[in-house]
Amino acid sequence: MERKGQIEVTFNWIYIVIAGAVILLFFTGIIIKQKAASEERLAVDVVNILESIFSGAEVSENTKNFVETGALADEILYFSCQDGIGEYGLQGYDYGVQNTVDPIFSPAEIKSPLLILWSLPYYLPFKVMDFLIVTSSNTKYYFIKDGSPFEEQLDLAMGEQDQRLSINHEFISFSELSQIKQGNNFQVRLVFLNEIDIDDIPTFLEIDRLTAVVFSNAGIKITYYKRGENRWELIDSADIISLDDQDRDAAKIAAIFAENGEMYKCNMEKVFKRLSYLIQVYGKENADGVIGGKLGELKQYYEEAIYPNCQSSYYEGITVPLYTLKHQVDNCVFESYNSDSCKSLDNTAADIAIENEKLDTAVSCTRLY
Amino acid sequence: MKKAQMKMMETIAIIFIFFVLVLFGIIFFYQYSKVSINERNEQFFAERAMRTTLKVLFMPELICTDHGRIEQNCFDLQKIGAAKEVIERNTEDYYFNLFSYAEITVHQLTKDGMMIPPAELDANKHLIYSNPKLVFTKKEPTYFILTLKDDITGHYDFGYLNVTVYS
Amino acid sequence: MKKAQTEMIGLVIIVILITLGMLFAAQFALNDDPEKKIFTRKGLAYSTMSTILVTEFQCNDNMLSGKELLEDCVNVELGGMGRYSCGGDSCEYFESQVSALFSETLDKWGKNYEFTSKWITGTEDRELITITPKNSEREEIANPCKGKDIDTSNPFPISLESGLIQTLLLICD
């Protein structure tokens, strides 16, 4: 009897352990699967939300939006652009958003509790698109002062009354460079607004993810560097196409925030592709030689006999540079931002701007834009 | 023996009840997930409708400008005609990436300050983008009222934008 | 034994009831006023308001914007002579034109709305124009937005020398 009882007790315990282990394993399996599924779902949700935020931020031109990342502060957001296709998402997850339309200029990786989205309109000479600059509260930009008008423009553009809600930047002199520190910054960029010999920049700075950009050729070229072991390594460079005398030169400012020349050029390709279509809306060159688009309608309305000055302004003044701009943009896009046509865009755009102004002031006809 | 059998039955009953509870839990979770997924899809679809509408409202191809300055809630009548053609010609390689499956129409309700008679409203409709899904599960129209500016005369007419997205 | 069995059955029934209850609750708890609805209502209210004030209406040989008509309406309301007469005074003309536009837009889209324009000075607050949807007997519905989710255009003030015209559009579902 005693033995029977002992066996029963032992059996009961073994039975409990086995049954308990099976049940625990079952639930543990469910939990692990759910965790993985949940993380993937989070990545999808985050990227979709970012898409909505970026779309909204982009259309509110000349504004800065501050977005708290909350629980994603420790996750890395990646941004890239290659062959005209931009992509962004959460690093380590399969889900990312690809975009062939909207230009987004940002560091390649951002890990921060606060995202800063800055939308700037780009004109060439009429408004083409809004650039979206994405940066973060822990990406620091040191601008080396040179007293140039562009420095003043940047100071005005980035200065905010509330320091907590502004782009993390500082204007310093060259001699103060050796004193800069990592601080709480995930990455640091030095911005030289005037040409400089890269070897003059100190390399001993104890800062992770340190990069530098140097403007040259009177601000129409930008070169990107990263800090190597004991020297600065050249990454690449890009030409900047923009009109002079702008309050906020979107092309130049975006170049400061782009990770490198490749990202900058890839995004500018998207912009010029859009410009190509936009030019056709303003003045399409038809096969039969008749001007289409808005310019065509204006020309039709301002008949030669009644408005001879308007006609000549529309035809000789604006139409020719508009067609030239179209050809140059198409070549620029075709050559992937590597042709001389790209460099001439700003001059041609400036010609159109002058003629457009004349329509109003000199001959009192409706402006093209 | 009988006591042992009773005990066994009791144990079996307990385990049976336990697995019934687990089953209920799984059914509940499945139902919740189904509803949750549908809700998420609805939300994504609504967000897509919002994004598309915003993009159209601020399109440089349509928007009014005054000495280079953008005028909000305003489309340029001269540009609308030209934009229609450009968008239609380049839907596949560019504008589809912007709007996906959608229909975008601008309706004009006044012309030169006068109400357009109902019979003529259809003729004063501008189909900017048309790429509907032939077989769709959802369709979401969004309406926005805006001014239509005749840049030649400088007059502002009344109109509205209809953006319908398909899923 | 029987008592224990009865208890057991009781517990099972409770569990089943709770589970079923939670299933139903989950279906309803997830319903919320979606963001898009709010965005569209707000956007529509704002865009409608800004469009009405800018849109030009033909009044005999004049092209007058909604804003100009409202400004002239103030003169009429204060007992003066309106500058414009378009088959009625400016207030009536504005109301008829805007009502017609709303009937082709907001009414057709099933939106309820309340358009109000007031003349505000330091001493008085006078109603100039109110436009709401009409019922089947072509009578204006009073308080169409009562008890509904409302979004507003935010006031669009027009400053005049002696006061302010405050115009507001509420759209509700």
Image: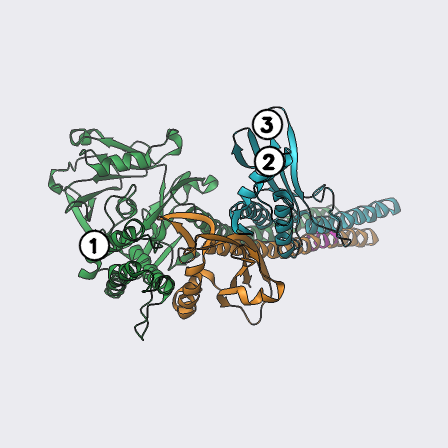
Chain colours: A green, B orange, C cyan
Residue C91 at x, y percent in the picture: 63, 43
Mark 2 sits on what residue?
C75
Mark 1 sits on what residue?
A347
> Looking at numbered disc 3 in the image, what kind of residue is underneath it?
Thr
Subunit that carries the residue with mark 3: C
The reply to whether dot 2 and dot 3 touch (C-beta < 8 Å) is: no
User: Which one is earlier in the sequence, the residue at label 2 or at label 3?
Assistant: 2
Q: Residues within 10 Å of mark 2 (few under 14, many from 20)?
A: some
Residue A118 seen in this snapshot: yes
Q: Give the spatial CA distance, label 3 vs label 1.
A: 54 Å
- The mark lying in front, picked from 2 and 3, is 2
Seen as rendered, the residue at the extreme bottom is A288
Give whichever of C108, C81 is nearer the camera. Answer: C81
The magenta segment is B17-23
Q: Give a yes or no on whether discs 1 and 2 share a subunit.
A: no
Q: Is mark 2 on a helix, strand or loop?
A: helix
- Quick check: A19 left or right of A347? right
- Quick check: A188 left or right of C82? left
Q: Give a yes or no on whether discs 2 and 3 share a subunit.
A: yes
Q: Is mark 3 on a helix, strand or loop?
A: loop
Residue A134 at x, y percent in the picture: 36, 45
Mark 3 sits on what residue?
C121
- The mark lying in front, picked from 3 and 1, is 3
